[in-house]
Amino acid sequence: MEKSRQASIFAEQSIEDYLVCGNIQQMYIYKINYADSLFGLGYTQKALSILKEVIQYARGNDQPQILDIALLVQGNIYSYCHNSDIAKQSYEEGISIAKRISLDWDYIYGMIYYNLHLFKNNMEIIDFDENTIKEYVYLKELNDILKLYVKCKHGEEVNTEVNFNIPAARLH
């Protein structure tokens, strides 16, 4: 909770700073971060309202690099809120855009959380090319945590002697 509060404060200040200096694209990126941190603090409706604004801006101004991650964060929120249809739609569109414009980090992030959503809703998870994941330590370890989670839930034996470099990652 404290990390979300700190992220919220930083994102809110960054939004103001980017607005003042006229960097609208970065301002909207930080609005996504702000929405994500608000969600982490329990302000779900406020987070969704901000994301709706960001998505509308990105669609209207041909900003796919903003649209993809906004849709993925929206997918996370709707997945957490058990609105599977909107979550699925958000994930699929965000992943498709990230893949089309070659944003590997966004694509991998989206696939990890989409697979978690699918698994939690008793649907088959989707294999994806993990070759590019190696250069993103956080995402690689998040994906490894998801794989361990799936194995545990299926009653499979897991290696408990795993060393992760990132602090505790949160899978919603």
Image (cartoon, helix red, strand yellow):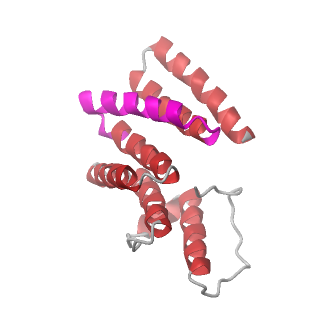
Q: Farthest residue in the front direction?
A: 82
Q: Main secondary structure of the magenta part?
A: helix
- Let me know if residue 43 appears in the view: yes
Question: Against 103, is 152 above or below?
Answer: below
The answer to whether 113 appears left or right of 156 in the picture is left
- Let me know if residue 61 appears in the view: no
Horizontal and vertical percent position of residue 114: 43, 60
Residue occupying image coordinates x 49% and y 46%: 77
The answer to whether 160 appears left or right of 11 in the picture is right
Circle count:
0
Horizontal and vertical percent position of residue 159: 68, 83
Q: What range is drawn magenta here? A: 40-65
User: Does the magenta portion include 163?
Assistant: no
Residue occupying image coordinates x 45% and y 30%: 49
Question: Against 124, is 93 above or below?
Answer: above
In the picture, residue 34 is in which quadrant?
top right
Horizontal and vertical percent position of residue 72: 42, 48
Q: Quadrant of the N terminus?
A: top right
Horizontal and vertical percent position of residue 125: 41, 72
Q: Quadrant of the C terminus?
A: bottom right
In the picture, residue 65 is in which quadrant?
top left
| Residue nearer the viewer, 87 or 140 | 87
